[in-house]
Amino acid sequence: MTLTRRAVLLSAGALGAGPTLNGVLTGPAAAAAPGAEPSAETKWTARRSDNGWAIDPDAVDSFRVEGSPATVRLHRDASAVLLHVARRWHYEVVPLHSSRDALGHRTDRAVRAAYESNYLSGSAIALLGAGDGLWPHQEAIVRDILADCGGVVRWGADLSPAAACHFQIDVGPDAKPFTQLTKALRDRAVHHNGPRPGAVEDPAAPERRAKARRLARTQSKN
């Protein structure tokens, strides 16, 4: 799926918001199509979020996004993957200037789309600060980040209603791809054998671009 610049615009309300997701995921820029009516707000009553993660505030902690001044509250088990996404976003897409630019766990159960419930379990993150949207080279980086995560993470631009600031763990906590990715990321951190902060393999390399395109086709259809 090829995203237009209009599809990735972030609402002005999102940029001015405090530590809350109200207006971030359901503002004008999150609409599935121009002129579409916003979804009605409902209360999420299930014990698990839409992606199968238990809603347990005791499993949530605060984490700093490496290289930035931002901290974000996430499920401890989801933190390695979502912080990897946030770190690459900070270095390669849009700098995170404060904790207002990275929003995670929330307790307000009012949602307009099922995927917003993933914030209740701390298994989703909203990364802001893109101003009037993402340029094509930034979109390419985001696709590379998703490919780097092997399909474990899904971008809100591929969901309905679209939300270009939204990233979620797209599998359950016991899914093998998730546990393998988490182990790999934590091993890198412990043994310092991964890329330096801000230094990754070239996202423009043909094999990486091909992998990113294949995943985009898959995730945009589901």
Image: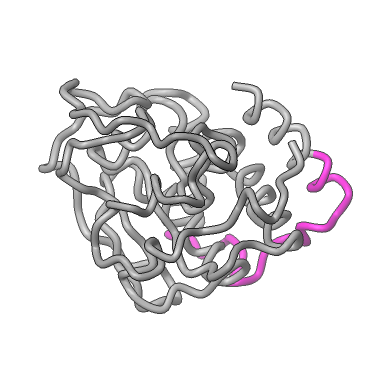
Residue 53 image point, x, y percent: 29, 28
Query: In this picture, which residue range is highlighted in magenta?
Result: 189-210
Q: Along the line of sight, which residue is nearer the eye, 50 or 187?
A: 50
Q: Residue at x 71, y 64 (%)?
A: 135
Residue drawn at (33%, 53%) of the image = 23
Which quadrant would residue 59 be assigned to in this image? top left
Q: Give x and y (percent) for residue 149.
A: 58, 42
Q: Is residue 137 left or right of residue 46?
A: right
Q: Residue at x 21, y 48 (%)?
A: 106
Rendering coords of residue 58 (x, y %):
10, 42
Q: Position of residue 192 (x, y in %)?
A: 51, 65
Q: Is residue 102 left or right of residue 214?
A: left
Question: Relative to 79, is 142 on the left or the right?
Answer: right
Q: Which of these two is toward me, 79 or 3?
A: 3
Query: Does 126 appear in magenta?
Result: no
| Residue 136 quadrant | bottom right
Chief secondary structure of the magenta span? loop
Work out which residue is located at the far right of the displayed protein and give it: 206
- Residue at position x 32%, y 69% from top? 100
| Residue 70, placed above or below residue 203 | below
Q: Tell me, yes or no, whether the highlighted magenta stretch contains residue 195.
A: yes
Q: Quadrant of the N terminus?
A: top right
Between residue 145 and residue 32, name the one nearer to us. Answer: 32
Say which of 32 and 157 sits in front.
32
* Residue 194 drawn above or below residue 181: below
Q: Considering the image in quadrants, where does the C terminus appear?
A: top right
Q: Vertically, is 14 above or below 43?
A: below
Position of residue 23 relative to residue 71, above or below, is above
